[in-house]
Image (cartoon, rainbow, N blue to C red):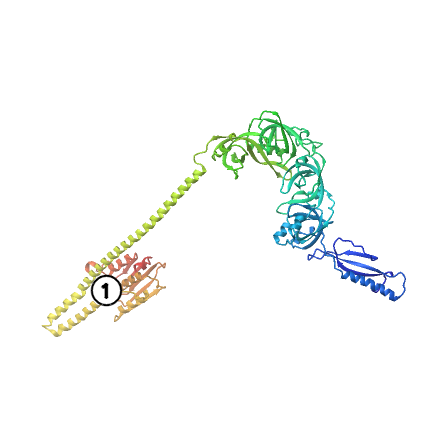
């Protein structure tokens, strides 16, 4: 390789790019080997590469060009061999996963990690750490996704301190990024990373998640957990949980109130929004909890008055136990008891199964806690020292207790005479409901009470609850119970805590006394009565509906029968009138004409030449009159014609051979006029036209039909310019003339209006209007 201009003559430089096993530092037999790590490749891989610059030495003495070329050729072959050798598999530093955002970690970026196992919990729980960070290995998620390809025997055999290599993908998990594994290989034994001293700002913010840390504090209690013991450790500035397997700690009781040093892995507890709620420390190896100061005897703790467990002190007592003395007012074995001394009452949490009785004078040693924002003792040891007098219950309304505490907080002073938390009080209340435990093994009962404008709960934790089960909602009660206040912040600016709820604890069922039984009208009975009323009303409505249907059917049948009888009566009256009219017409015309013809025929014997032509003319006149009568008697079916066409038809027949002009006028679409109405209008028009032609000697007759002001009425007008007459003076039914009377009655049967205007020498006008009835089609 030619020398770079300006470079020293003693060295020849070349640059080689190789895969970078992150974090490894190599020495080489070459004179100089410098490595420069480049930035990680974006997203597709978490494994970077590196560049190496190698300086090849020139010989110290220049002997010959051939020898120099041989030396350079040898180094070139060496470089070629290095480049052709299998490259080390690229690895990912744990910190590269931990710094991913949730969006990037969710892309399941491939990773190849090597680290030391720092904690091993259950079958699928472990953490590892390299020289950059620690991480949770989420085996459960790998199984769920179907990525897991490692023999379970390998996973079960993994121990703390082993070096493992893991191939998997990134995942955001619930709080911090984790590694979802596919393959896990045990490489060998390693050394656990040095535990970092706990820095409160990092630890309580979750920044130390999955790292080995060392904390010091006082054990203030314990309870059983899923994988072992859960120790409550106080280390300034707060409390947190240390979880350790039972194989690493046999008896946690000896650690209570001891000062210990704990080495383990910091694990964060979080909510469903991915926010830190409580840091924890996981331990799985014996010796990871070291007692630095053994616990003192419980009752050797400093004695303080019951009202001084958490007051202002220039010199705090520290996180160790305190000892108090008081009189038992209520006890639930294995859970808690209440002590009272003077005007102060304190709740004491204890595991002691001793059945303490009200009035017992006891000594209690425990740790102060503020879980309810009211000072109480936890993990308490209790022993009896004598008997005392149980304080009497004070008559006090719950709503007044809340009011006086809120008033005291608003002024920044103590509640007067006291806050009443843990005190026995007596008050009236109205029972709203009785609730039983869902499990019969749990004997508690809860009463929902109404006191003034306040709703509160009264709980009986143990004892005979038969008397409470017999209570009926609505009962007026007198309740004797222990007050239990619940505080919450209501003023952020003032950082004020005030009671937001008050419940009471019942000591015995007989301390709930019925003052007044509820009325007979309980909600259940009222609902039952309402149900009966609704059922009766429904039955009545159903019966009324059925009755209405029957009445409707009967009404229809009655209406049909009445219509039939009416039609029969109308038909009979019409027939009778038509017979009378026909009789009068025949009498006035045909009979008299025939009589005249007979007279002329008899006179023909004397003078046939004179009387026979007269008889012949009278016979022709009789034939015409008979033809007119027959034409007037004919029915007028429409035969599919609309009303205007039917009117024109009768006008053409009536005007045939007559020296008169007959005009028919229509306005609007009269096609929807029912046949029943149209037929009656035709008969009226025919009668009026016949009367005009017979009696008025008109030159013109006008028939006009149209809709009235609304489409539910139809108007017919027949107007002539004939002789006219005086209305009322014309011959009527008594004289055998039925024309006007018949027309009027026909229109009245249709519930229409009939108007006749006439005067001698001014012609006659007949105007009628009839409604288009909804039943016309049925009648038609």
In this rendered view, identify the residue nearer to me: 286 or 617.
Answer: 286
* Residue 576: percent from left, percent from top: 21, 59
In the image, residue 278 above or below residue 23:
above
Q: Is residue 457 left or right of residue 557?
A: right
In the image, residue 672 above or below residue 238:
below
* Residue 123: percent from left, percent from top: 64, 47
In this rendered view, identify the residue nearer to me: 82 or 157.
Answer: 157
To which residue does mark 1 refer?
Answer: 633
**Which of the 4 image quadrants contains residue 562?**
bottom left
**Which of the 4 image quadrants contains residue 656?**
bottom left
- Element marked by disc 1: helix
Q: Is residue 713 left or right of residue 139?
A: left
Q: Quadrant of the N terminus?
A: bottom right
Q: Specify the farthest residue to the left.
A: 606
In the image, residue 339 above or below residue 135:
above
Is residue 454 in sight in this rendering? no
In the image, residue 255 above or below residue 89:
above
């Amino acid at each position: 390789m030619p020398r770079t201009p300006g470079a020293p003559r003693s060295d020849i430089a070349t640059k080689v790019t190789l895969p970078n096993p992150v974090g490894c530092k190599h020495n080489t037999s070459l004179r100089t080997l410098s490595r420069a790590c480049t930035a990680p490749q974006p997203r597709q891989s978490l494994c970077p590469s590196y560049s190496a610059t190698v300086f090849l030495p020139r010989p110290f003495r220049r002997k010959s060009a051939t020898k120099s070329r041989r030396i350079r050729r040898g180094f070139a072959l060496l470089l070629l061999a290095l480049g052709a050798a299998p490259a080390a598999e690229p690895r990912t530093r744990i910190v590269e996963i931990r710094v991913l955002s949730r969006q990037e970690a969710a892309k399941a970026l491939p990773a190849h990690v090597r680290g030391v196992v720092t904690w091993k919990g259950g079958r699928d729980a472990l953490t590892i750490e390299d020289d950059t960070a620690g991480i949770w290995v989420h085996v459960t998620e790998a199984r769920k996704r179907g990525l897991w390809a490692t023999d379970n025997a390998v996973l079960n055999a993994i121990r703390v301190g082993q070096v493992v290599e893991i191939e998997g993908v990134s995942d955001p998990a619930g709080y911090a990024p984790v590694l979802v594994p596919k393959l896990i290989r045990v490489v060998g034994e390693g050394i656990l990373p040095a535990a970092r001293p706990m820095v409160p700002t990092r630890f309580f913010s979750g920044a130390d998640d999955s790292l080995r840390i060392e904390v010091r504090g006082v054990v203030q209690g314990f309870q059983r957990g899923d994988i072992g013991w859960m120790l409550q450790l106080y280390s300034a500035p707060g409390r947190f949980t240390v979880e350790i397997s039972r194989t690493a700690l046999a008896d946690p009781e000896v650690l209570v109130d001891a000062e210990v040093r704990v080495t383990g892995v910091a694990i964060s507890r979080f909510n469903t929004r991915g926010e830190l709620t409580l840091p924890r420390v996981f331990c799985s190896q014996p010796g990871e909890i070291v007692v630095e100061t053994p616990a003192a005897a419980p009752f050797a703790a400093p004695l303080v008055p019951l009202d001084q467990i958490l007051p202002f002190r220039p010199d705090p007592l520290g996180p160790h136990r305190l000892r108090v003395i008081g009189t038992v007012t209520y006890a639930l074995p294995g859970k808690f008891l209440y002590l009272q001394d003077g005007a102060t009452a304190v709740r004491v949490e204890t595991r002691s199964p001793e059945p303490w009785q009200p009035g017992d004078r006891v000594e209690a040693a425990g740790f102060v806690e503020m879980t309810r924002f009211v000072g109480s003792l936890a993990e308490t040891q209790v022993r009896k020292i004598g008997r005392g007098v149980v304080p009497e219950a004070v008559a006090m309304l719950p709503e007044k207790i809340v009011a006086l505490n809120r008033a005291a907080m608003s002024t920044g002073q103590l509640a007067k005479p006291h806050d009443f938390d843990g005190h026995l009080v007596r008050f009236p209340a109205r029972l709203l409901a009785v609730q039983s435990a869902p499990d019969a093994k749990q004997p508690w009962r809860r009463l929902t009470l109404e006191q003034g404008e306040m709703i509160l709960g009264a709980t009986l934790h143990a004892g005979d609850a038969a008397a409470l089960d017999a209570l009926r909602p609505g009962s007026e009660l007198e309740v004797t119970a222990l007050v239990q206040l619940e505080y919450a912040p209501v003023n952020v600016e003032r950082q004020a805590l005030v009671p937001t709820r008050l419940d009471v604890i019942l000591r015995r069922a007989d301390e709930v006394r019925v003052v007044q039984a509820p009325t007979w009208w309980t909600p259940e009975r009222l609902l039952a009565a309402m149900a009966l009323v609704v059922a009766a009303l429904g039955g009545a409505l159903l019966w009324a509906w059925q009755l209405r249907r029957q009445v409707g059917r009967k009404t229809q049948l009655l209406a049909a029968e009445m219509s039939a009888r009416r039609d029969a009566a109308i038909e009979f009256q019409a027939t009778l009138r038509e017979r009378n009219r026909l009789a009068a017409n025949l009498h006035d015309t045909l009979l008299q004409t025939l009589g005249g013809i007979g007279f002329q025929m008899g006179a023909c014997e004397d003078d046939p030449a004179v009387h026979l032509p007269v008889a012949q003319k009278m016979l022709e006149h009789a034939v015409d009159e008979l033809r007119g009568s027959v034409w007037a008697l004919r029915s007028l079916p429409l035969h599919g014609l609309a009303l205007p066409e039917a009117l024109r038809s009768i006008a053409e027949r009536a005007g045939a051979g007559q020296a008169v002009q007959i005009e028919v006028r229509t306005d609007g679409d009269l096609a929807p006029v029912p046949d029943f109405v149209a037929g009656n209008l035709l008969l009226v028009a025919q009668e009026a036209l016949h009367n005009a032609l017979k009696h008025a000697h008109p030159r013109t007759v006008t028939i006009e039909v149209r809709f009235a002001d609304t489409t539910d009425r139809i108007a017919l007008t027949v107007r002539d310019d004939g002789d006219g007459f005086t209305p009322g003076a014309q011959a009527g039914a008594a004289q055998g003339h039925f024309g006007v009377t018949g027309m009027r009655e026909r229109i009245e049967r249709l519930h229409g209006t009939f108007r006749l205007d006439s005067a001698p020498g001014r012609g006659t006008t007949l105007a009628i209007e009839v409604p288009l009835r909804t039943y016309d089609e049925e009648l038609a």
